[in-house]
Image (cartoon, rainbow, N blue to C red):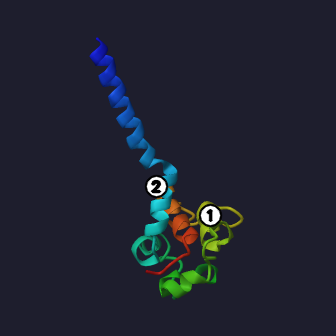
Amino acid sequence: MRFFFLGLIAVSVCVVSRTSFTTPEAMAVDLEKASTYNKDVLPILESNCFSCHNAKKKKAGIDLQSGFAGVQKIVKPSSPDDSKLFKCLIGKGAKLMPPKSPLDEKQIATVKAWIAAGAKEK
């Protein structure tokens, strides 16, 4: 019986130590380090924003399809809460975008992490 409890304690210690490395904070830091416009943000914008915010339509005067330069106009690097792009994605102080099918939490977190990490292109 004593060996059972020792085994249970050993397993518990392993589980606790393993999960301490995968906290939400740790995952957010990893995402911030890895996030770039071309790799992470561009695919989200292509599939959700380009149909309205392109050179032809330019809804709200915004052309996201013009590349990184177009996105820079609505992003304040290292400050997601002051960036028009992020505000629109969460509907804070701006119209929620995209209006008919908002981004999921993971996509929003990706854009936020990218901006927070300095909004790098590559």
- The C terminus: image quadrant: bottom left
How far from the left and from the top, in percent, is residue 49? 50, 73
Which residue is disc 1 drawn over?
Answer: 96
Q: Residues within 10 Å of mark 2 (few under 14, many from 20)?
A: few
Label 1 sits on what residue type?
Leu
Q: Quadrant of residue 80?
A: bottom right
Checking the image for residue 27, the label placed there is 2
- The N terminus: image quadrant: top left
Q: Residues within 10 Å of mark 1 (few under 14, many from 20)?
A: some
Q: Residue at x 27, y 17 (%)?
A: 3
Q: Is residue 113 above or below residue 61?
A: above
Q: Nearer the viewer, mark 1 or mark 2?
A: 2
- Say left or right for 33 vs 72: left
Q: Can the viewer see residue 107 in this picture?
A: no
Q: Residue at x 48, y 77 (%)?
A: 50
How far from the left and from the top, in percent, is residue 72? 57, 82
Instruction: Give the residue at the far top of this rendering.
Output: 1
Secondary structure, mark 2, is: helix
Q: Can the viewer see residue 92 in this picture?
A: yes
- Say left or right for 92 vs 38: right
Q: Residue at x 47, y 73 (%)?
A: 45
Label 2 sits on what residue type?
Met
How far from the left and from the top, in percent, is residue 17? 40, 40
How far from the left and from the top, in percent, is residue 4? 29, 17
Camera-nearest residue between 48 and 18: 18
Camera-nearest residue between 104 and 82: 82
Camera-nearest residue between 72 and 79: 79
The first of marks 1 and 2 along the sequence is 2
Q: Residue at x 65, y 61 (%)?
A: 91
Q: Quadrant of residue 100?
A: bottom right
